[in-house]
Image (cartoon, grey):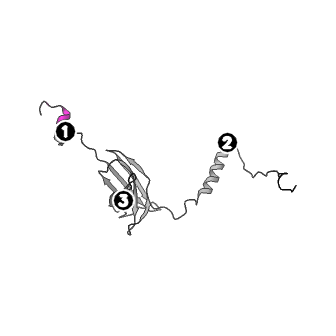
Amino acid sequence: MAGASPQARLDARAGMGGAPPRLATIVMGSAWNQDNTPIAAARVQLRNLTDGKIVATTVADEAGKFTYANIEPGTYAVELVGANGKIITVGQAFVIAQGETVATFVRIGSKAPWFAGFFNSAAAAVSATAASQGVTALAPVQLPRSSSGGGRQ
C-alpha cells in the first residue's frame, strides 16, 4: 500500500474496496405537550411519506428527546403514538438526504378547532394591510338602494 493513492489507502482502511464511506443519516427530535413541557417516555414513530410505511419506532427519554439513526434518504414525518397504538398527533413533514441530520419535533396541539382563531387573524390582517396603505379608519359602506328589480322604490 506504500505506493497507493491517499484515497485508495483510506478506502482500504475503511474496508470499502474503493466505495466512498456511507455517511450517517440521523433524525433527532423532541416530543412536547401543548404547554411546551417535554413528554417523558413518549412513543414516537417515523413514517416514510412516500410509501406510507413506518420505518422506525422508539421511546423518548425523560426530556422528551428521541433519535433515529441510519435512516434512508426520503420524506418523513414523526408521529406521537398513544398507549393504545393510535396516532395522537403528527409533526411537520421533512426531507432528509444521505449524510444529513434533521432536527424536528412533535407537539400535542390544543383541542380548539382549526378555524378557532381564523376570523380574528383575518380581521387583524385586513387592518394591518389597510394601515400599510394609509387607511386609518374602516367603516361599513352603505350601498344605494337599487331602483330596479323589486318593484319597490
Q: Earlier in the sequence, mark 1 or mark 2?
A: 1
Instruction: Estimate the spatial distance between the alpha carbons at disc 1 and disc 2, rounded to whole Å.
Output: 64 Å
- What type is the residue that disc 2 sits on? Gln
Q: Position of residue 54 (x, y in %)?
A: 35, 58
- What type is the residue that disc 3 sits on? Gln
- What type is the residue that disc 1 sits on? Asp
Q: Residue furthest top?
A: 3
Q: Residue at x 43, y 56 (%)?
A: 91
Crowd band around label 3 with a 10 angstrom C-alpha radius: few (<14), some (14–19), many (20+): many
Q: Which residues are magenta?
A: 1-10
Q: Position of residue 44 (x, y in %)?
A: 37, 60
Q: Is residue 63 above or below residue 125?
A: below
| Residue for badge 3 | 45
Query: Do residues under tags 1 and 2 come within 8 Å of each other at their CB atoms?
Result: no
In the rendered view, does 35 fall on the left or right side of 2?
A: right
Q: Residue at x 16, y 40 (%)?
A: 13
| Camera-side residue of 106 and 52 | 52
The mark found on residue 71 in the picture is none
Q: Earlier in the sequence, mark 1 or mark 3?
A: 1
| Residue for badge 2 | 133
Tally the marks.
3
Q: Secondary structure at mark 1?
A: helix
Q: Secondary structure at mark 3?
A: strand
Q: Secondary structure at mark 2?
A: loop
| Residue for badge 1 | 11
The quadrant in which the C terminus is found is bottom right
Q: Position of residue 77 (x, y in %)?
A: 40, 54
Q: Residue at x 35, y 53 (%)?
A: 28
Q: Nearer the viewer, mark 1 or mark 2?
A: 1
